[in-house]
């Protein structure tokens, strides 16, 4: 069985040419102590633990249209199988959403990469908010692309699970918050980017107000029919709104449980 410690040792930073600069890099997830040759050999011999699975996932993302070198490097660095149930680990690098309990899912890799690419838009945002931490996977990806990441989760059991998943990876620029994501986190706003991992019936006004001028909100909107929306705050009381592709997310709900 692959341990978290083994995967931490296998993680490697992206090369400078592949990495978008950030003010404060998520050094914890990128650094791993040297691994003895015997352990490296054992890791290389396992299909799941081999870097080739993540590399193959990255190539599929590239073929599907993801162009940002920084996003592709981040997707290749984060071990997705550590964020899913052990029984689903063999499916971790498929391009599919997987259940994480409490009627929630971990988004498919393409959606994670697509939303991150839209959020960054070729830049390195300083402060980002993720609404819907879930198991913590997307937060770990975002932490490699932004200076500071705040991730809020309304379900206490998932908040605790994400904390447990992320603790061994040591991500110093990531803060997890237990709270109502529809309210955002006004105390640390404004945000250069906000990404929402659940579908809203309408765009929450609180999130619009917590965007910095020029900030980008990536959010799925709709009930039976959903679409991904890109909203940019262009002035104090003005936002542009662009409808992108159809998507399917769990619903965004208010309150805390």
Image (spheres, helix red, strand yellow):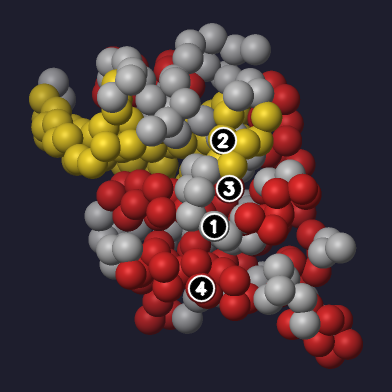
Is residue 46 visible to us here?
Answer: yes
Task: From this view, report whether residue 21 is shown above or below residue 179.
Answer: below
Q: Position of residue 129 (x, y in %)?
A: 43, 36
**Rounded to the nearest whole Å, what is the CA distance between mark 1 and mark 3?**
15 Å
**Rounded to the nearest whole Å, what is the CA distance between mark 4 and mark 2?**
22 Å
Q: Position of residue 45 (x, y in %)?
A: 77, 82
Q: Which residue is mark 2?
A: 105
Query: The N terminus is located in which quarter?
Result: bottom right
Point 52% across, 74% down: residue: 55
Point 54% across, 9% down: residue: 255
Q: Compare marks 4 and 1 and give the one earlier in the sequence.
A: 4
- Mark 2 closeness class: few <14, some 14–19, many ≥20 residues within 10 Å: some
Kindly indicate whether the residue at mark 2 contacts the one at mark 4 (C-beta within 8 angstroms). Answer: no
Q: Between 103 and 194, which is closer to the camera in this rendering? A: 103
Q: Quadrant of residue 230?
A: top left
Kindly indicate whether the residue at mark 1 contacts the one at mark 4 (C-beta within 8 angstroms). Answer: no
Q: Compare marks 3 and 4 and give the one earlier in the sequence.
A: 4
Q: Which residue is mark 4?
A: 56
Could you tell whether 179 is left or right of 228 in the image? right
**Rounded to the nearest whole Å, what is the CA distance between mark 1 and mark 2?**
14 Å
**Rounded to the nearest whole Å, what is the CA distance between mark 3 and mark 2?**
11 Å
Q: Compare marks 3 and 2 and give the one earlier in the sequence.
A: 2
Q: Which residue is mark 3?
A: 137
Q: Position of residue 212 (x, y in %)?
A: 26, 34
> Residue 94, labelled with which disc?
1
Q: Between 164 and 80, which is closer to the camera in this rendering? A: 80
Point 39% across, 64% down: residue: 61
Q: Compare marks 4 and 2 and give the one earlier in the sequence.
A: 4
Tag nearer the camera, 1 or 3: 1
Q: Compare marks 1 and 2 and give the one earlier in the sequence.
A: 1
């Amino acid at each position: 069985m692959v341990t978290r410690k083994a995967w931490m040792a296998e993680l490697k930073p992206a090369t400078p040419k592949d990495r978008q600069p950030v003010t404060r890099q998520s050094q914890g997830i990128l650094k791993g102590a040297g691994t003895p040759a015997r352990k490296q050999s054992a890791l290389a011999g396992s299909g799941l633990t081999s870097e080739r699975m993540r590399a193959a996932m990255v190539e599929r993302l590239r073929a599907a249209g993801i162009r940002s070198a920084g996003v592709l490097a981040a997707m290749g660095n984060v071990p997705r199988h550590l964020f899913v149930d052990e029984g689903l680990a063999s499916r971790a690098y498929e391009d599919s959403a997987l259940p994480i309990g409490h009627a929630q899912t971990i988004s498919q890799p393409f959606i994670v990469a697509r939303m991150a690419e839209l959020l960054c838009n070729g830049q390195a945002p300083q402060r980002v908010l993720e609404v819907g931490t879930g198991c913590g996977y997307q937060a770990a990806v975002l932490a490699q692309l932004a200076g500071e990441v705040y991730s809020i989760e309304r379900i206490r059991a998932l908040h605790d699970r994400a904390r447990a998943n992320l603790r061994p990876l040591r991500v110093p620029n990531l803060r997890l918050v237990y709270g109502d994501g529809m309210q955002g986190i006004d105390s640390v706003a404004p945000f250069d980017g906000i990404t929402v991992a659940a579908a809203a019936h309408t765009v929450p006004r609180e999130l619009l107000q917590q965007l910095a001028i020029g900030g980008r909100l990536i959010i799925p909107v709709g009930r039976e029919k959903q679409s991904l929306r890109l909203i940019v705050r262009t002035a104090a009381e003005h936002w542009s709104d662009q409808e992108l592709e159809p998507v399917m997310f769990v619903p965004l709900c208010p309150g805390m449980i």
